[in-house]
Image: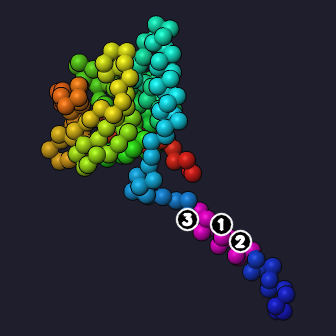
């Protein structure tokens, strides 16, 4: 075979290799996703603005629409259904990541559950969250959350009710990760 006849075949193989490498570069592990996780400040501001507009019109501010808008996690329904609805649609994790939605399990005192957006990782047992309606009809930003689970697995937490004051223990289903911007 002559060299000029080999070039078209080589170009095809190079194109295939390039596509494989491009695909590999886009693939990411959960840890890589966590390392790149950031709070989308534009979404957060839109959620805050929408909550303020609702309150001005006398409309109730709820955790679900706030978390959906602030995170970009497009799930509908009561907060206690989000963990199950996220399965197979969004990546779910047992560890908090900035920008992820913390899905509280339903309890007797909170039968519809609760959702909040992780705004900061302070350390391996402390995060901050943004959420709505923890205090009736209010948006709370940067509220502390402490992991009080025996195995440091974020299955049980205490939420900062007021600055420096942490309330009772709540069960957590886990964290729902928004779609990666480059996915």
What residue is shown with label 2? 15
Query: What's the mark number on residue 19?
Result: 1
User: Could you tell me which secondary element the residue under label 3 belongs to?
Assistant: helix
- x, y percentage for residue 69? 50, 29
Q: Nearer the viewer, residue 90 or 65?
A: 65
Work out which quarter of the rendered image holds the N terminus and state it: bottom right
Residue found at the far left of this picture: 150
Question: Where is residue 114, by image quadrant?
Answer: top left
Q: Nearer the viewer, residue 156 or 43?
A: 43
- x, y percentage for residue 160? 23, 30
Main SS of the magenta part reads helix
Crowd around label 2: few <14 · some 14–19 · many ≥20 (10 Å): few
Crowd around label 3: few <14 · some 14–19 · many ≥20 (10 Å): few
8 lies left or right of 126:
right
Residue 17 is inside the magenta segment: yes
What residue is shown with label 3? 24
Q: Residue at x 47, y 35 (%)?
A: 71
Q: Are marks 1 and 2 in contact (CB under 8 Å)?
A: yes
41 lies left or right of 83:
right
Residue 105 is inside the magenta segment: no
Residue found at the far front of this picture: 163
Name the N-terminal-most of marks 3 and 2.
2
Q: Residue at x 17, y 48 (%)?
A: 151
Q: Are marks 3 and 1 in contact (CB under 8 Å)?
A: no
Query: What's the mark number on residue 67?
Result: none
Magenta-tinted stretch: 12-24
* 57 vs 38: above or below: above
């Amino acid at each position: 075979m002559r060299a000029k006849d080999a070039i078209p075949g080589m170009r095809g193989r190079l194109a295939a290799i390039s596509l494989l490498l491009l695909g590999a570069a886009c693939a990411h592990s959960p840890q890589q996703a966590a390392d790149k996780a950031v709070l989308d400040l534009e979404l957060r501001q839109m959620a805050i603005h929408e909550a303020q507009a609702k309150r001005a019109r006398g409309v109730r501010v709820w955790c679900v629409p706030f978390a959906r808008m602030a995170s970009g996690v497009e799930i509908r329904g009561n907060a206690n259904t989000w963990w199950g609805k996220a399965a197979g649609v969004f990546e779910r994790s047992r560890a908090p990541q900035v920008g992820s939605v913390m899905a509280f399990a339903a309890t007797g005192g909170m039968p519809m559950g609760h959702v909040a957006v992780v705004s900061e990782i302070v350390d391996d047992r402390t995060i901050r969250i943004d959420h709505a309606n923890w205090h009736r009809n209010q948006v709370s930003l940067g509220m502390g959350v402490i992991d009080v689970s025996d195995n440091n697995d974020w299955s049980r937490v205490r939420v900062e009710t007021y600055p420096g004051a942490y309330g009772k223990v709540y069960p957590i289903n886990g964290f729902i990760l928004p779609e990666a911007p480059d996915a």
